[in-house]
């Protein structure tokens, strides 16, 4: 099958896809290697680097879906996106000294969109096991955090983690276009819910004109595209899946409705929580035994990558920043 046949949006050409995929990979490797020079301190530099890595990882998933790659091919990599945002969060909190600062700012439209995309992908890729980790990025410390800051976020998390774990609120930080999606999630019948989601998607692209990625498919004055990875409302697809709407053909008219991913999620509903936990990236705190032979790293310090044997006690890295959390390095080359 040719690239033009399998791609999911007609704006993506093969040359642009290959160029952006290469540029994202190079950017990720560059920011992994050193703190960004735009930071005033080393900590701030690493914070900026990991924020860039996390965004590039999410953009790469979107790009691969837009290019028509099989869902299973990038489902395995999705956990790396969440892990990168966790690394960004670790450096953000070290920089600010405030663990109640959310990783995604609710009042910043671009970040709110990223949060909704990330949550939507958790449901559509059957990776609900990652939702508690996203909640940890947003909720802050127990008893004095950010619970109840946004009602759409709380509604999605109630579906994934149970309503008893979440907070009641009427606040919606980004009313346009997300109010209609919230209304859809809280409707009592599939028909009325579908109407609200349809209304949400009708205005989705127009209402997000203030984002950095809007109209990125249009060539600049030199005829070049830049920063186009695909336009997708993964959160709308997640809502359809969660509400048990069987016939979503009414939404297929919207280019940015991820109908292929919704269909894949339905076909793979057998994926169990045990399968998801087994696929999750390994993490270990200082003082715990290493769960697997290989290379590990921690954002609690610089140049921390090293090899541990299974059963070896994970060490503490000397710093003023809480418990050291070690993470499995995806690159296991020596």
Image (cartoon, helix red, strand yellow):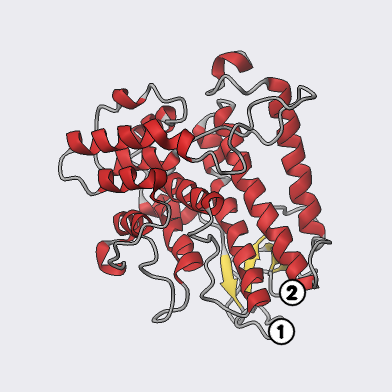
> Picture coordinates of residue 239 (x, y %)?
32, 42
Q: Is residue 114 above or below residue 17?
A: below
Asked which quadrant contains residue 216, the reply is top right
Q: Residues within 10 Å of mark 1 (few under 14, many from 20)?
A: few
| Residue occupying image coordinates x 38% and y 21% | 253
The residue depicted at 26 percent of the width and 43 percent of the height is 184
- Position in image of residue 263 (x %, y %): 37, 30
Q: Residue furthest left?
A: 189
Q: Is residue 46 left or right of residue 55?
A: right
Q: Which residue is mark 1?
A: 319
The one nearer the camera, 145 or 170, is 170
Q: Is residue 245 above or below residue 130?
A: above
**Residues packed near mark 2 inside 10 Å, few (<14), some (14 to 19) or many (20 plus):** some
Secondary element at tag 2:
loop
Q: Tell me the quarter of the picture where residue 68 sits.
A: top right
Which label was assigned to residue 301?
2
Q: Position of residue 70 (x, y in %)?
A: 53, 29
Q: What residue is at 42 percent from the left and 81 percent from the top?
A: 144
Numbered mark located on residue 12 in the image: none
Between 169 and 316, the residue placed more toward the observer is: 169
């Amino acid at each position: 099958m040719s690239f033009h046949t399998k791609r999911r949006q007609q704006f993506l050409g093969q040359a642009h896809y290959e160029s952006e995929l290469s540029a994202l990979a190079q950017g990720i490797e560059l920011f992994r290697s050193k703190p960004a020079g735009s930071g005033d301190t080393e900590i701030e530099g690493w914070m900026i680097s990991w924020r860039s890595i996390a965004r590039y990882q999410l953009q790469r998933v979107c790009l691969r879906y837009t290019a028509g790659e099989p869902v299973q091919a990038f489902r395995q990599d999705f956990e790396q996106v969440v892990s990168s945002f966790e690394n960004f969060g670790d450096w953000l909190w070290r920089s600010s000294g405030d663990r109640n600062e959310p990783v995604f700012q609710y009042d910043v439209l671009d970040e709110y969109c990223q949060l909704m995309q990330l949550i939507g992908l958790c449901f559509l890729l059957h990776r609900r096991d990652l939702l508690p980790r996203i909640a940890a990025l947003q909720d802050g410390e127990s008893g004095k955090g950010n619970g109840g800051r946004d009602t759409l976020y709380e509604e999605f998390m109630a579906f994934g983690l149970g309503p008893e774990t979440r907070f009641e609120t009427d606040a919606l930080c980004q009313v346009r276009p997300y109010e209609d999606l919230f209304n859809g999630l809280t409707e009592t019948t599939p028909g009325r819910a579908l109407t609200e989601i349809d209304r949400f998607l009708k205005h989705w692209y127009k209402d997000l004109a203030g984002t950095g990625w809007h109209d990125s498919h249009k060539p600049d004055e030199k005829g070049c595209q830049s920063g186009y990875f695909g336009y997708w409302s993964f959160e709308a697809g997640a809502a359809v899946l969660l509400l048990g709407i069987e016939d979503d053909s009414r939404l297929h008219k919207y280019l940015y409705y991820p109908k292929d991913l919704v269909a894949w999620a339905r076909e793979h509903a057998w994926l169990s929580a045990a399968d998801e936990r087994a696929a999750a990236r390994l993490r270990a705190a200082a003082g715990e035994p290493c769960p697997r032979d290989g290379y590990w790293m921690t954002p609690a310090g610089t140049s921390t990558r090293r090899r541990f044997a299974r059963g070896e006690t994970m060490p503490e890295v000397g710093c003023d920043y809480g418990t050291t959390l070690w993470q499995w390095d995806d690159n296991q080359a020596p």
